[in-house]
């Protein structure tokens, strides 16, 4: 039983991680400023003697005693992180600095959730951990991509200089319940298809992504935290889709669920095309060789299984009227 | 006549810039923590009514009123910036943040001295400003390279979000008087040759650099500050040498000067080889098309002229015993 600090614990990934850590019997403290997260995602733990929820912005220092820090605090969806790009890069840099300072003082183990965005619009495919990336340092995505890159730089700076025990997870696109309105592709497509709206493909849909389900990610993060691996480790799926094919797959799954429930609407939802955002990466797929070797981890959820679970969840939520 | 703030103004580039700004009649305030700079480099201005020297670390906020900010504060030589890599990246990030905050409050124009290191070990040659770079985010040079990349990200964040009037100079390798012991290649080679020591080539000497003389850089910085160009602008030389050839050229120039002075020693100094530092860029040459077009700037000093001036300067200094 450990004292575990989770920054950004009220967000999408954080709340799933907190659920798992609580079920494992740890003492969990969540730090969150509720910029993109919400109290309701962890609301079911409030009042539990092992749980504490603290409203705190990680840009400011924070003192506590703990054994492990999962440092997630940072908006992750392009519309969110571009809302105030200066704030995003400050959160990434100063939040990580403060949590590393805390780890140094308490000798806690520190894990940061970095991202496949450190590889940018990659020229090496699939992306392995030794690849240095192709990132525009002054483009609209830079606040997030460069913020994470320099957060990694800081992390290894504290590791080499102060002996802080660090773990770096480079997370690839992840989807799952709890985050329907984040503007990212999986939730957009599912909600559009469920509501009978046009499904919006940005660009011509030829860009690729590989999508992992949240449960696999949580497994990977906990495995990494409790491993001896201090190098960066990709956590993601290597099951690559073009966005165009993915739209059709989501539509097919939504229709299947609707048919089973006898709610299949006519006419069928259509796919429409919108402009491609600037610097949108052309392809992305995780090379997870290292995770397999050092963590014995690999994804267990297929996209079909995960999307179907999400569709049922959102459908039930919509029926509830929430 | 303007009120000009120069951070890092006691360093190599800063002190040359300060000389020029003072001669142009501006009111100049220097902020420096004297980590690599020294009071003596600007000592000749102390007491001048237009000059002020303030001991201040840019990691901390600073308030003043001014019209232009040249933000240079940051160690630039690999041995210096690797001495405390966490401090380097903090200087780069928080120093830039604070100076942008100051620029926002005072509506001063803000110029940052970024670096060709944002291009890393480049795969595009020569390097133009649209190239995104090839940088190892967690290597030994990352504290400097990623620190500068994220400082640019911040700069354009404040530009877009708060309307701060910004200038970004990406400076390529620069040499000149005042900085004999910075561990960089030009001063190392000259001092070694003058002292009759072995000249140390790291690696096999096939890596390339292009070297600009400090007077050209100062011209370029002042031209950029007073131009309308808000995009990044390379300031450097496009005269490319392998490090091996450059060693021979320096030796030849040193011997020429020694011969004229009748001090040519025997035996001749030798070139020796040492291990190549990790992530040492294989080639680097500035594409200065943009600077030519928008600033009508181009280097006027050849390497032969610049190195010869430096050799005479250091020889005189050595004769003085300093
Ligand atoms: N979801 C993905 O596909 C994905 C992919 C790569 C990396 N990641 C990383 O995983 C982490 C969690 O992402 P997510 O998808 O759960 O995003 P999210 O936006 O749902 O969660 C982020 C959480 O951090 C909080 N937060 C933001 N700024 C804060 C600040 N300054 N102080 C305190 N709390 C703050 C938010 O309120 C929110 O609860 C992030 O670090 C993200 O970069 C996610
Ligand atoms: N010399 C080059 O070839 C070169 C190339 C590219 C970019 N640059 C950039 O030009 C600028 C000046 O470089 P330089 O060659 O004169 O280096 P330098 O080390 O001689 O000068 C840097 C100055 O900044 C000061 N400083 C460092 N940290 C500080 C802090 N936290 N607070 C206040 N002052 C601080 C140092 O004391 C020193 O006076 C740097 O930003 C550097 O990155 C230089
Ligand atoms: O328990 C702690 C210890 C440190 N810090 C912050 O972490 C950062 C880095 O701390 P460190 O001790 O490494 O550096 P310093 O305080 O010397 O800047 C600083 O902003 C501290 O305020 C924190 O938030 N909690
Ligand atoms: O409604 C949407 C949302 C996103 N995308 C595309 O889907 C991919 C993944 O986008 P997301 O924002 O989920 O994450 P990213 O990987 O870009 O950070 C990108 O190519 C987006 O341009 C899309 O076609 N339609
Ligand atoms: O004259 C000033 C104004 C601001 N700042 C610092 O610049 C940074 C960014 O300032 P900004 O106003 O953008 O942000 P905020 O204060 O809201 O964090 C802050 O750390 C300020 O302390 C400064 O050093 N001098
Ligand atoms: O005594 C020296 C110092 C540097 N170098 C090499 O010269 C080049 C320029 O090094 P410097 O430190 O001046 O600047 P950099 O461009 O690497 O930042 C690099 O390839 C170094 O490995 C060298 O051969 N001998």
Image (spheres, coloured by chain):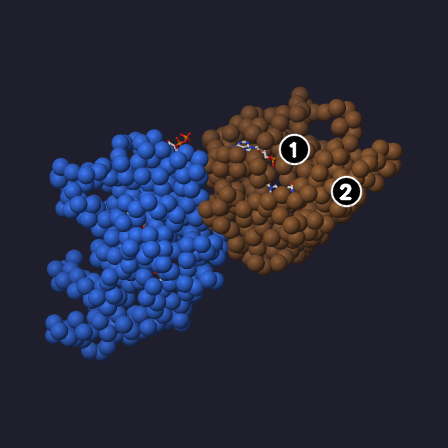
Chain colours: A brown, B blue
Q: Residue at x 35, y 72 (%)?
A: B244
Q: Chain of mark 1?
A: A
Task: Indicate the secondary structure of the residue bearing disc 1.
Answer: loop
Residue B137, image x, y percentages: 49, 52
The mark tally for this picture is 2
What is the x, y in percent for residue A307?
75, 41
Near-viewer residue (B226 or A147): B226
The mark that comes first in sequence, 2 or 1, is: 1
Q: What residue lies at 75% left-to-right and 24% top-to-bottom?
A: A321
Front-lying residue, A92 or B21 = B21
Relative placement, left or right, of A223 versus A97 is right
Q: Indicate which disc residue A251 carries.
A: 2
The image quadrant that residue A34 belongs to is top right
Is B95 above or below relative to B178?
A: above
Q: Does B12 sit left or right of B79 as displayed?
A: left
Q: Is residue B182 above or below residue A8?
A: below
The mark found on residue A181 in the picture is 1
């Amino acid at each position: 039983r450990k004292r575990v600090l989770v920054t950004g614990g009220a967000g999408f990934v954080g709340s799933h991680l907190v659920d798992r850590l609580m079920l494992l019997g740890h003492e969990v403290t969540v730090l969150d400023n509720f910029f993109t997260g919400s109290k309701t995602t962890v609301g079911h733990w409030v009042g539990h003697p092992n749980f504490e929820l603290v409203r705190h912005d990680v840009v400011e220092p924070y003192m506590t005693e703990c054994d492990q820090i999962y440092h997630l605090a940072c908006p992750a969806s392009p519309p969110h992180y571009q809302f105030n790009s200066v704030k995003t890069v400050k959160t990434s840099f100063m939040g990580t600095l403060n949590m590393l300072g805390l780890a140094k003082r308490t000798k806690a183990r520190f894990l940061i959730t970095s991202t496949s965005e450190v590889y940018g619009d990659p020229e090496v495919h699939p992306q392995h951990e030794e690849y240095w990336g192709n990132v525009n340092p002054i483009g609209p995505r830079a606040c997030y991509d460069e913020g994470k890159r320099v957060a990694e730089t800081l992390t290894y700076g504290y590791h080499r200089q102060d002996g802080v025990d660090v773990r770096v997870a480079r997370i690839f696109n992840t989807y799952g319940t709890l985050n329907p309105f984040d503007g990212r592709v999986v939730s957009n497509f599912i909600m559009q298809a469920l509501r009978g709206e046009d499904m919006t493909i940005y660009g011509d849909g030829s860009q690729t992504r590989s999508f992992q389900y949240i449960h696999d990610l949580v497994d990977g993060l906990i495995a990494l935290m409790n491993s001896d691996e201090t190098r960066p480790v990709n956590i993601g799926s290597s099951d690559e889709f073009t966005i165009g094919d993915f739209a059709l797959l989501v539509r097919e799954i939504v229709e299947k669920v609707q048919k089973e429930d006898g709610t299949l609407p006519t006419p069928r939802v259509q796919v429409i095309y919108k402009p491609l955002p600037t610097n949108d990466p052309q392809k992305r797929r995780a090379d997870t060789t290292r995770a397999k070797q050092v963590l014995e981890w690999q994804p267990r959820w297929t996209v079909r299984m995960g999307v179907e679970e999400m569709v049922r969840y959102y459908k039930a939520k919509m029926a509830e009227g929430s």
